[in-house]
Image (spheres, helix red, strand yellow):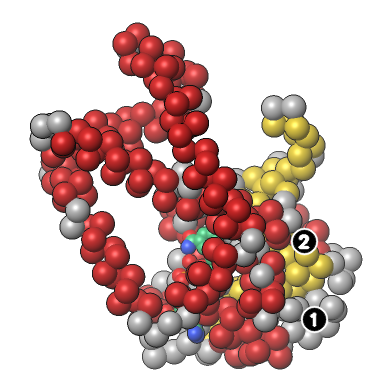
Amino acid sequence: MKLKFGNVEENVVTRDEFPLDKAREVLKDEVIAVIGYGVQGPGQALNLKDNGFNVIVGQRSGSKTWDKAIADGWVPGETLFEIEEACEKGTILQFLLSDAGQIALWPTVKKHLTPGKALYFSHGFGVTYKEKTGIIPPADVDVILVAPKGSGTSLRRMFVEGRGLNSSYAIYQDATGKAKDRVVALGIGVGSGYLFETDFYREVTSDLTGERGTLMGAIQGIFAAQYEVLRANGHTPSEAFNETVEELTQSLMPLVAENGMDWMYANCSTTAQRGALDWWKPFRDATKPVFEALYDSVKTGKEAQKSIDSNSKSDYREKLEAELKELRESEMWQAGAVVRQLRPENN
Ligand SMILES: NC(=O)c1ccc[n+]([C@@H]2O[C@H](COP(=O)([O-])OP(=O)(O)OC[C@H]3O[C@@H](n4cnc5c(N)ncnc54)[C@H](OP(=O)(O)O)[C@@H]3O)[C@@H](O)[C@H]2O)c1
């Protein structure tokens, strides 16, 4: 259906419009092979299975992830296979390896993309940056995308709670004439609350911007800046952490999620309200140039290249651990660990 977001009309698909029964009917003859069992793999595979679809998992054996798949109920030789075998058996290949893993495994997957199959992604990365990744799908398969807007962990958790994360969907190539039905059915099957339409390029550029920006990069940067100013002015770690992070995540953000920012501003103290209304624009103006530089770096492919280069290195995990350690051991997040322990529900 068409729905207005502000003054802009967009295509969305709701569960009412495309119920689970219809999704099951569309995919009744398909074998959905979920390739990769990292973060998205388990969420999508388990939701599809619980929704009554025919699902198998492809994962390299001899790794902890293989054992996790067994612990989750997948049975070797029946519903759990080596990647190549799953690619051979599947009619829809859900390519859910890490983006670097997708580059490494592409020749294997490509070999089994026989005419009429569908290649499914949860990120536009591999295909959009095909000059860098080498992922160029054959012309006679559908190439589709469902990108849940959140972690695979939330996708599963919200499904179990009877809720649903929203996802975007896109069609890059419709070889069979069935790509739209296939992609929407899969989107509903993996547990999406509703689906909004995009294309591979817009999905990857908005996603790379968002995760580097307000979702993760910018938010940590702003937290750190405020925390440092409070500490430099004599505030204690617990006070600085509470005023910077804890109040936001525990109290305010759930309310903003429910009611929007204007409601939040209307329902705080008049003092807080005056200050927030005065200061949000200076913060927007100060950070906008950084967001513009970020978007430019995404658009020109620099961010993609950096990810490919660093994530393909053999010492990737050690370097990552060192960077995470810096965050974990920063005073702000050390204070955070103590504050989390003090929450009554954790005692
Ligand atoms: N993380 C999220 O919540 C999220 C959200 C939206 C979209 N996405 C997209 O979903 C896709 C999957 O992301 P993810 O975060 O779930 O990936 P991930 O956790 O990094 O994926 C790890 C999986 O890839 C396998 N793998 C990695 N390199 C491999 C190689 N060289 N050979 C064989 N297997 C290899 C791992 O097996 P081992 O454990 O054996 O190494 C594991 O099964 C990506 O396109 C991502 O952009 C992710």
Q: Residue at x 28, y 36 (%)?
A: 226
Decide if residue 249 is on the left or right side of residue 93.
left
Q: Is residue 52 above or below residue 207?
A: below
**Closest to the observer, 152 or 32:** 152
At mark 2, the secondary structure is strand
Query: Where, quadrant-wise, is the N terminus in this rendering?
Result: top right
Decide if residue 162 is on the left or right side of residue 113.
left
List the residue tagged with mark 1.
138
Q: Residues within 10 Å of mark 2 (few under 14, many from 20)?
A: some
Decide if residue 312 is on the left or right side of residue 246.
right
Identify the residue at the far top of this view. Answer: 270
Q: Residue at x 26, y 57 (%)?
A: 327
Query: Where, quadrant-wise, is the C terminus in this rendering?
Result: top left
Q: Residues within 10 Å of mark 1 (few under 14, many from 20)?
A: some
List the residue tagged with mark 2.
171
Give the amino acid type for the residue marked by disc 2 in the picture.
Ile
Q: Sequence order check: which comes first, mark 1 or mark 2?
A: 1
Q: Residue at x 80, y 59 (%)?
A: 180
Q: Residue at x 49, y 45 (%)?
A: 290
Quadrant position of residue 131: bottom right
Give the amino acid type for the residue marked by disc 1 in the picture.
Pro
Indicate the position of residue 255 as horizontal and vertical percent values: 41, 27
**Closest to the observer, 235 or 72:** 235
